[in-house]
Image (cartoon, rainbow, N blue to C red):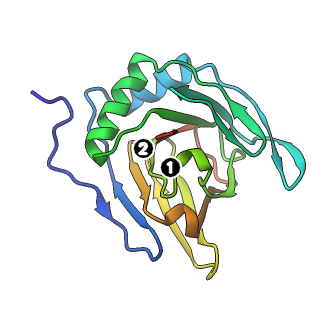
Amino acid sequence: MDLFSTNMDLIPIPIEDGELSMLAQLPMPIGNAEILARLLAETPWRADTVVVYGKRYLQPRLTAWYGEASYTYSGLTLHPLPLTPLLETLRAAVEQATGRRYNSVLLNHYRDGADSMGMHSDDEPELGPQPVIASLSYGASRTFTLRHKRSKRTVKLDLTDGSLLLMAGNLQANWQHGINKTAKLVGPRINLTFRYVS
């Protein structure tokens, strides 16, 4: 019996100049709360600085990089840790749900509403011309904002506990995305972005 078998499919989200789809709950053999607790406890979280427009900033969240390849963005080079058994299980479930292969994953820990992710595109050369990014969330819901690079049109999505968002096609070439700070009282959230790094 397949632990990840499900009748649920990724639901396409209409968007111009890119491909976007979402699954409200990734099927897993263990519960969301247990996954969140284990990721919080088992991950060697780092507080890194990045370069944005020539200036160095401390990232407003904690991160960890796992997989088969190093990855560089905003002047920061990440050297991978080997995937843990839990991350291997999550990767298998994400690969089955999306029909894509991933060899690396970036974990972001948003400790509270003061932690955020600036607007950006995942368009580094090692991700290829049409990057596929599978974004898996556990913990508190946060609003995910996409902004078109030319028209400036915005799309907002709530990334809820256990949800999976797939970004593909020309989305990274035409859109930026991020997570804004919020004054609301929100608990911790972990986001895992699976990708294939060549």
Say the numbered circle drawn on residue 161.
2
Q: Residue furthest bottom?
A: 151
Image marks 2 and 1: residues in contact by CB distance under 8 Å: yes
Residue 136 drawn at (x, y percent): 44, 43
Residue 16 drawn at (x, y percent): 45, 77
Residue 13 drawn at (x, y percent): 37, 68
- Residue at position x 52%, y 67% from top? 156
In this picture, residue 165 sits left or right of residue 93: right
Instruction: Say which amino acid is labelled 1.
Output: Ser
Say the numbered circle drawn on residue 48.
none
Give the mark nearer the N terminus: 2 vs 1. 1
Q: Where 53 falls versus 88 (above or below)?
A: below
Q: Is residue 146 visible?
A: no
Label 2 vs label 1: CA separation?
A: 6 Å
Give 61 or 84, whichever is nearer the viewer: 84
Residue on which the image places disc 1? 141
Q: Residues within 10 Å of mark 1 (few under 14, many from 20)?
A: some
In this picture, residue 66 sits left or right of residue 103: right
In this picture, residue 20 sits left or right of residue 112: left
- Residue at position x 37%, y 32% from top? 91
Tell me the quadrant of the picture where the N terminus can be found.
top left
Q: Where 6 falls versus 149 (above or below)?
A: above
> How many numbered dots are placed on residues in this image?
2
